[in-house]
Image (cartoon, grey):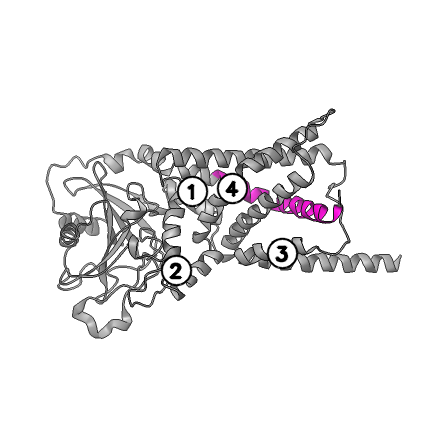
Amino acid sequence: MKLNNYNRFWRMHFYAALFITPLLITLTLSGIGYLFYTNAENALYDDLFFGDSGKEETFTLEEGISEVNNTYEDYTVSKVIMLDEPYNKRLTLTGNTGDEKYVFLDDNNQIVGDQKAEFTYSNVLRNLHSSLFIGGTLVNYLMELAACWAIFLLLSGIYLTFKGKALQVRNTQNRRQNNKRNHALIGLIITIPMVIIIFTGLPWSAFMGSQINKLGESYPDLGNTEMRYNPPTSDVNEIPWATRSQQEPISEQHEDHRGHAGHHESGARTPNDISNQLSVEEISNRADEEGISRPYSIIYPTDELGVFTVSKGSNSGITGLDVSPYEETTNYFDQYTGDLLGKVDYQNYGVIGKWFTWGIPLHEGHLFGWPNKIINLAVCLGFLTLILLGFMTWLNRKKKGSLSAPIKVSKKLSIGFVSLMVILGLIMPLFGISLILVLILELLLNLMDKRKKEFS
């Protein structure tokens, strides 16, 4: 067997696994926890989701919202989520410092209770999965990079399996060979589903996700529906992926100020006392008239020029709010007249928008119910087993006091190897950038080795 490509792949496979395994374990375990976030939250927050206030007096929805604003003086209601029975209504409040709180109203529109948004089960798991609770661009890039290198590990593992005949059973099979064979076998089984899971999660990533979004904005037929609006950035979880970066239409009363339209924001304080603004209850009635069925969220205008946004998505991340991709819709209502100013449905999305409208709930495990969760769980557990067996195989061959890394080859790079790295680098730009850094590091190490030999 030629050692050129084999050892080069093995060496990269070894070092990649060595450095990113902790991140991969974190991503996988947090992903498993997030698979069941709706089940966990239904049990953990049973009193908030399904309980009642114990008060018999009935409020209108607007009176309930007013009571919430009076009770939580440092917060303002920015979103109202109308869920199906038996869920209570859920209000999102934005504080003076930008923090968020959830408040729940029962059937009488009385306050049941509240919770800090950042400490809910789903948000804790989501923050761990994406940013290790640390946040910031660098950490987000690091988590994305680990996912990209996981793709390389899986693909290079297939090459090593067949090239190294890892599945072959020998007459004198020792523990290391057993671990290696099982490692290779599990890798072959889970590679395709694991690659699908990883790639369907990348639209939310910091680097590749932004590139996909820019592509969708530049070519509306491929990505987002243009609807004659210039799309800014957005961070609202409840807005469907394909429309979350679009700019809202402008309420007719302020048509002259179109350039100052509000965007889909959740961090800004939202005025609830704009003169002549319709009530959320009236907007909810207008949504019903337009045939928008529950569950859906109503997002307040951010200023006098904005509109009410009524939306339902397949990837909201909110217990009780996710719907089928076909049901996704984003509707813009004039805040003064209630007129429907714009509407984007799933059918209006471009190819990219439709693909990720299906891909994200598949990644999160709720596209087709319990079977989706079970399949994702099995793949994730298989991936963890794969990591464990790889580690055990290394320990079995590791010599005391040595890293026992695969030997370095000095032959020139083959066209096949270079082609694969270029293709992966183009598909995953952050992976490509990391490859350049690896190449620079290799060149520096080679230069140091040459100088040592010359000095000797």
Quadrant where the image shows the N terminus: top right
Q: Which mark is residue 419?
A: 3
Q: Secondary structure at mark 2?
A: loop
* Mark 4 vs 1, N-terminal side: 1
Q: Secondary structure at mark 3?
A: helix
User: What's under tag 1, amino acid-wise?
Assistant: Leu
223 part of magenta stretch: no
User: What's under tag 3, amino acid-wise?
Assistant: Ser
Q: Which mark is residue 125?
A: 1
Q: Are marks 1 and 3 in contact (CB under 8 Å)?
A: no
Q: Where is residue 141 shown, x and y percent of the image? A: 52, 55
* Mark 2 vs 1, N-terminal side: 1
Relative depth, front residue between 206 and 219: 219
Q: Residues within 10 Å of mark 1 (few under 14, many from 20)?
A: many
* Mark 3 vs 2, N-terminal side: 2
Relative depth, front residue between 304 and 169: 169
Q: Are marks 4 and 1 in contact (CB under 8 Å)?
A: no
Q: CA distance from mark 2 to mark 4?
A: 25 Å
- For discs 4 and 1, the disc positioned in front in the rendered view: 4
Q: Are marks 3 and 4 in contact (CB under 8 Å)?
A: no
* Mark 2 vs 4, N-terminal side: 4
Q: Residues within 10 Å of mark 2 (few under 14, many from 20)?
A: some
As displayed, is residue 413 above or below residue 303? above
Which residue shows up at 49% across the image and 40% down it?
193
Q: Which residue is mark 2?
A: 222
